[in-house]
Each structure stands twice: as C-alpha cells, then as structure tokens.
Image (cartoon, grey):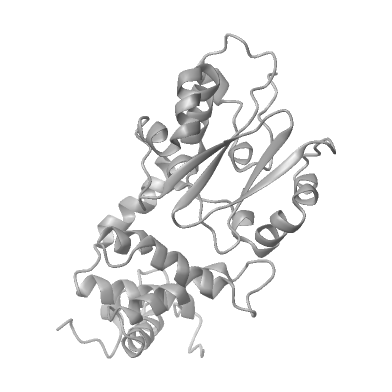
C-alpha cells in the first residue's frame, strides 16, 4: 500500500474488510451498529468469570443446588439469570479427590460465555487446543498445576451445542464461609480446569 | 457483529461453529494462533456469502472504498466512508 505523505490514515486490509462487512450489513438493515456496541460492552464489562464463580460458590454451600447443577446445569445456571446467547446447553463437571476435569474446544473456541465471559487468548490457540487432549498432564504442569500421578484427568471437548463448567474442589478451611467469600476463591482458570480454587489466605 | 447477526436469526450457532472450525483447522493456520481473527473474518465472510447476505465482490469493493477513505482522511480525524473520493451515497 502506498503512502503519499505522513499524514494519511491507513486501514490495514483486515480492518477495512471488517468495516466493509459492517457497512454492507447495516445498509441492508441486517445489523444495527448500536446493537453491536451493546453486545461488546456486555461481554467486556458485565459478563465475566464472576458469574461462574457465583455458580460454583452456591454449589459448594448448597447441596440441593449442587445436585441440580449436576443433573441439569443449563437450568440451574439459568436460575441465577445467566443465560447463553446461543441457546447452548451447559454441563457442570465436578472435580473430586481422584479426578480432575479439564475443558477444551479442539475444533475452534466454543466457550461458556454466559458464565465465564470472553475466552482467554491461550484457550483459542492451537497449542492448547491440540495438546490438552494429547498431553493434559503436561499442559497442566505448564499452568503450574502438578497433580498427583494417581489423579485421573478427564478432558471435555466443547461443541457449539454443549459447553462445560468445571466445579473445582472446595478448599479446606472454608467451613462457614459465605457464598460471596467463597466466590473470591474461584478463578476463571479453575473453572476451565487449568487451576484449582485458591486456598484461603 | 457475529453475535448480532446470529441474534437476527441469519444463521444458527452450529453453522457458525462449523464455518469457524473449518477455517481454524486449515493446514496453513499458524501454530501460535496469532491469525485467529483472520480465520474468524474469513469464516464470517464465507458464511455470509453462502447465505447471499454479502457477496465477495461487494465486500472487496467496499473494503477498497474504506481504504481510499482512510487515505483521504487527515490524520487524527475519524475515518468516514464519505471521505472516499469516489464515494456515492447508499442507494
């Protein structure tokens, strides 16, 4: 691309094509730029891993809710007003002393947006997507999570229709904690399965 | 934009996931994923073209118009499509 002088603006081809699509679709009345701004703002600022952390904390404190979450995660999560845009189903997978769960999307980057917000960059990158299945223990090691050799690792491959939420083990020493206190121990990575819940300070 | 189009019922999320995974899974995809958003765009373009919502020649022409508009816009000013010297108002 040629530059006539220093004060020209330049759109790289990627940005120009995105704007082109937006222009064409707006002119056809298929999208409303204001609606897009609302969606972006919602996912950037309103929906995030705090949603999922509240689901996990409630499950830790309320056995009946935990049971519901196990049987019908879609409904149990919807009861807290966290609804998937794409109508996808949710499944909660519970870590136990003997089994650790790890979530990946080998095909693309399906992710439980309604409870975790936008996916981290590494979740969308080929190394994670391929190696989480081939060598989950090695991947977890790189995340600083070394599991005992006898702990089994189950890897769950997300699809457009079914997304997974890992319910990590409740840390010891948190008896009597409120859901709010407990939610602070639940990180995004713990709900993907690349970390455990934080230990109480 | 993808989410907004889906909200309008223009394609199902499965159709989108299929389109995206086809692009991301191509053999020339970068190992570190830095080209993820390029694949995203390619998948969206292909899906919209297949649905007859935005034909490739139209997108090519509009992208060129945006690049001309960018060139014609003084630095620091917002780039508007109207700044394209060949701009014609929407039909």
Instruction: Count how many numbered circles sit on residues in the image.
Output: 0
Image check: A68 left or right of A24?
Answer: right
The residue positioned 25% from the left and 61% from the top of the image is B8
Name the spot of residue A151 as percent of width and height, x first. 78, 36
Residue reaching furthest to the front: A71
Q: Nearer the viewer, residue A8 or A52?
A: A52
Q: Is residue A50 visible?
A: no
Say whether residue A65 is left or right of residue B58. right
Q: Is residue B2 above or below residue B51?
A: above
Q: In this rendering, is residue A34 above or below B75?
A: above
Residue A96 spot, x, y in % from top left: 68, 29
Q: Residue at x 36, y 69 (%)?
A: B77
Image-based side of A21 in relation to A147, left or right = left
Q: Quadrant of residue A8?
A: bottom left
State which quarter of the image contains the C terminus of chain A: top right
- Image location (x, y in percent) of residue B16: 41, 66
Query: Is residue A37 visible to the viewer in this orientation of the structure?
Result: yes
Residue found at the very far left of the displayed protein: B91
Q: Position of residue B50 (x, y in %)?
A: 34, 81
**Frontmost residue, B36 versus A191:** A191
Residue found farthest to the top: A176
Q: Residue furthest right?
A: A149
Residue B80 picture quarter: bottom left
Up the image or down, A114 lies above or below A15; here it is above
Judge whether A2 appears above or below A54 on screen. Answer: below
Q: Residue at x 40, y 50 (%)?
A: A88
């Amino acid at each position: 691309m040629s530059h006539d002088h220093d004060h020209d603006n330049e759109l790289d081809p990627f940005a120009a094509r995105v704007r082109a699509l937006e222009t064409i679709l707006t002119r056809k009345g298929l999208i409303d730029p204001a609606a897009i701004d609302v969606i972006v703002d919602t996912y950037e600022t309103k929906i995030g891993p705090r949603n999922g952390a509240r689901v996990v904390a409630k499950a830790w404190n309320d056995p009946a809710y935990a049971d519901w979450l196990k049987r019908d995660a879609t409904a149990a999560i919807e009861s807290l007003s966290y609804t998937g845009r794409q109508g996808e189903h949710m499944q909660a997978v519970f870590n136990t002393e003997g089994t650790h769960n790890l979530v990946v999307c080998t095909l693309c980057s399906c992710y439980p947006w309604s409870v975790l917000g936008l996916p981290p960059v590494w979740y969308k990158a080929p190394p994670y997507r391929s190696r989480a299945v081939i060598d989950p223990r090695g991947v977890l090691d790189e995340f600083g999570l070394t599991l005992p050799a006898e702990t089994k690792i189950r890897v769950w491959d997300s699809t457009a229709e079914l997304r997974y939420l890992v319910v990590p083990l409740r840390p010891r020493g948190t008896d009597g904690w409120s859901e709010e206190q407990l939610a602070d121990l639940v990180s995004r990575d713990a709900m993907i399965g690349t970390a455990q819940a934080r230990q109480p300070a | 934009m993808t989410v907004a189009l889906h909200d309008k019922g223009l394609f199902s999320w499965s159709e989108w996931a299929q389109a995206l995974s086809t692009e991301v899974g191509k053999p020339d995809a970068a190992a570190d994923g830095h080209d993820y958003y390029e694949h995203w765009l390619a998948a969206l373009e292909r899906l919209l073209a297949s649905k007859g919502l935005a034909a490739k020649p139209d997108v090519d022409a509009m992208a060129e118009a945006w690049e001309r508009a960018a060139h014609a816009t003084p630095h620091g000013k917002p780039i508007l499509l109207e700044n394209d010297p060949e701009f014609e108002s929407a039909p």
